[in-house]
Image: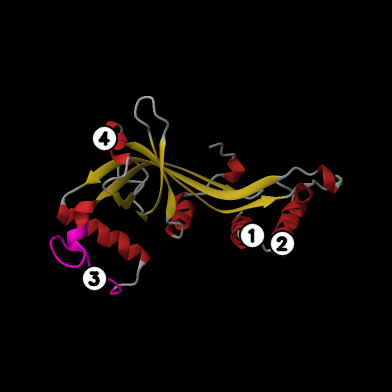
Amino acid sequence: MLIHPWDAARDAAEWQQWLAAHDFGQLAVNGLPGEPPFVQPMHFAYAPGSGAGAGTGFGEVVAHLARPNPVWPALAANPDVLLSVVDDYAFVPGPWQAPPGVPAEHGTPTSVYTAVQLRCTAEVVDDPELKAELLNRQVGHFQEPGTSVPVAAGEAPYGRMLPGIRVLRLRVTDVRAKFKYAGHKPEEVKDRIAQGLAERGGPRDAGALAMQRRRREDA
């Protein structure tokens, strides 16, 4: 992923805050010899780390997948994976991007979006007690406390389901984050993009507009 200086995250807090509200992505796993990469869409729970170094410094991701999932042999062969999360995207028509003094029809179409890529080392968890603990952490990210019975090994209603899943613990070793919202364009062009997104009101436009406004305010 190409990241120009004007699209880069300003600090770790920026991408961590964004990721806290974006918890569905695609896990890319190296394929077995002769096979293409394996890509698994999934919900996940991300917990930030405490430092900027390797290991747990960038944080940890918890997710789970069904035991019959074909991803497991590939993970056993190579635990280095990439979790890709993309959202707050929209298409920007060419006229919105035309530089000042240039005919609108000469503007270049583009996209705006946020993308965060987490490089991780995967650990597969099969221990029932630890699986239950990590599943409760993941569910707790999505649901209000008390809305579901906690998972406990050997106890109803979820204990009997534990053998049918495996938990993924992804230790984040590197992060690449991109906030592509015309940060290098003249203010007139940024205004035109903002106005266009507001007036068009497409399904993704509100999120893209909010991100563009925030990046401009923080600049």
Between discs 3 and 1, the one toward the N terminus: 3
| Residue 200 image label | 2
The disc, 2 or 4, on the residue closer to the chain's N-terminal end is 4
Nearer the observer: mark 1 or 4; the answer is 4
What secondary structure is found at the residue carrying circle 3? loop
Q: Position of residue 196 (x, y in %)?
A: 73, 59
Q: Amino acid at mark 1?
A: Asp
Q: Main secondary structure of the magenta part?
A: loop
CA separation in Å, label 1 and label 4: 40 Å
Label 4 SS = helix
Amino acid type of the residue tagged 4 in the rendering: Ala
Identify the residue shown where x is 26% and y is 35%.
Answer: 76
Which of the marked residues, 1 or 2, is nearer the chain's N terminus? 2
Report the disc number at residue 205: 1
Tell how many labels: 4
Crowd around label 4: few <14 · some 14–19 · many ≥20 (10 Å): few
User: Would you say 47 lies left or right of 132 here?
Assistant: right
Which amino acid type corresponds to the residue marked 3 in the rendered image? Val
Image marks 1 and 2: residues in contact by CB distance under 8 Å? yes
The amino acid marked with disc number 2 is Arg
The residue pinned by badge 3 equals: 149
- Give how far apart the Cα atoms at labels 3 and 1 are: 38 Å
Mark 2 near mark 4, Cβ–Cβ under 8 Å? no
Image coords of residue 38 (percent x, y): 40, 37
- Which residue does the numbered mark 4 point to in the structure image? 76
The magenta segment is: 146-161
Question: Where residue 198 sits: x, y (%)?
Answer: 70, 63
Quarter-of-image position of residue 155? bottom left
Q: CA distance from mark 3 to mark 4?
A: 32 Å
Check if residue 153 falls in the magenta segment.
yes
In this view, 45 is above or below 76: below
Q: CA distance from mark 2 to mark 3?
A: 44 Å
